[in-house]
Amino acid sequence: MLDYVTNEAAYQATADQIERGLFKQLIQLGRQLLLLFFTLRSQQSSRETCTTAVGVSLPYHRDTKRDYVSIFGKLPIWRPYFYQVGVGSACPLDAALSLGEDSYSDMLREIAAYLGVYGVYHKVCDIIARFLDLRLSSRVVQDQILTDAADVDTYYQQKPGPETVGEAAVLVIQADGKGVPLIVEAEMPAPVRLGKGQKRGHKKEAIVTTAYTIAPTPRTPEAVLASYYKLSAVTEKRAAEHPAPQNKHVWATLDGKDTALERLAHHIQMREGVHILQRVALCDGCEALQTRIASYFPNHTQILDFIHANEYLWDVATALLGEDDQKRLPWMIQHTRQLLAGQTRAVIAEFRDLAAQPPAKAHQREQLTKTANYFERNLPYMDYPTYLAHGWPIASGVIEGACRHFVKDRCELSGMRWSLQGAERLLRLRAVAENNDWEAYHTYRKRRRHKRLYNQPYPQLAAAELLALTPETLAIAA
């Protein structure tokens, strides 16, 4: 490799040519070194009588091969095989190397899974083939995600809450739903051509939850109004300086609202402490969610998402004035000011009066009544002056973003249909990635797998070997 970058041809080469050539050689070098590692480990393995974990003695039978598909390619591992008829069999080297059930290396499957939680499976295969010259099928990637997501629940059950030093005083939870297109398990063959209104799949609601802490930021209704309608550059600057959520945790499940909120309650319990001074729950007005939030989180103040409330105002403005009327924006500013100032009852009364007046058209009456009913039902959650004075968030932008990015952007691409298990497992592993728990989770997963397969402690490097692998040591050596 030194000759490759110092010979005469190298002086005529481009940076790109040399870089690509070095990468290929590094892959080949890695393949040879990994093969050497396996060969040495096999040679060093005892071929005397093997005693299993349950105390059964087995004689050496022969060396047997298993494949190991790594980022460097497919390699053979020859290991001693112990066997006795009617007693059992064992390959101690499998446990020493902590090999999984299949032939794929943990590094390769983690790369494929990380790409898979953010992009379609066939593209994952294309990327791996292009850069590592490995051929994986979409089915392999899908199966790996199904397998590797199995321990996500137990990982989060045992994971402690975030350090209090990095937390803020206001604990915020949010919940919302987003549809995931599922495969229809039909008994009859699928029609060649769909009829009007027919679809090849149906949607099931994924309940998305988030939890985070944030520093209280008191605002006035006028400041929020100016920021929302971009009435001044000063308010935009202040909005940009708004404190960021701390230790945001996102989750999604297709197992229903109760399952989602039970899990969120467990997460919140781990985050509680004297540092939490206020507790807030934001929701979009879904009665089923509001009722359950009140049950699972009785100490949280429920707030109706201001953006959803204001969308109802936009619908009324459009029904009364149309899309292009210049009076529409001033009308919106006036009525938004009333909501933020705690004058929602006056808005409800105005809408009911307008709906009762003879000039009102049918679609106008319908929208006015619908919005008045929505506001009236949500009055207990619309005390915006108090929320703003406390410095609480009043908009569920975090959960809206999660529904769009976390679920929609991955599960609703063109033509996509999911099995229930496939979507659920993908969302679990995607949550691990989004919560910045990827490395920690896979360390946990590998230890769990080792315990399950071999019922032995996970192999540990000696302290000197660990030291030799640290970046600081490598830098000193260089």
Image: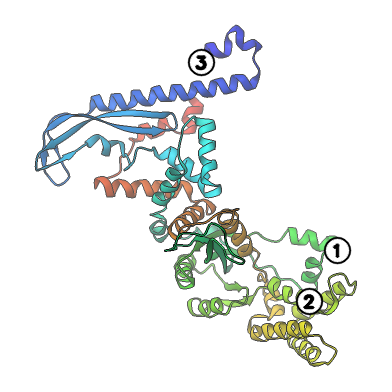
Secondary-structure class at tag 1: loop
The residue beneath circle 2 is 336
Mark 2 residue type: Thr
**Is there any visible trace of residue 418 in the rendered image?**
yes
Q: For this view, does 297 lie left or right of residue 465?
A: right
Quadrant of the rendered image containing residue 229: bottom right
**Are there few (<14), some (14-19), or many (20+) residues within 10 Å of tag 2?**
many
Distance in Å between CA atoms under marks 3 and 2: 68 Å
Q: For this view, does 360 lie left or right of residue 103?
A: right
The residue beneath circle 1 is 232
Q: Which of 375 and 6 is in front in this view?
A: 375
Percent across and percent down for residue 95 are: 26, 39
Which mark's residue is nearer the viewer, 1 or 2? 2
Percent across and percent down for residue 396 are: 64, 68
Distance in Å between CA atoms under marks 1 and 3: 61 Å
Vertical relation: 176 (above or below) 386: above
Q: Which of 189 and 300 is in front in this view?
A: 189
Which labelled disc corresponds to residue 1?
Answer: 3
Quadrant of the rendered image containing residue 236: bottom right
Mark 3 residue type: Met
Q: Which of marks 3 and 2 is nearer the N terminus?
A: 3
**Are there few (<14), some (14-19), or many (20+) residues within 10 Å of tag 3?**
few
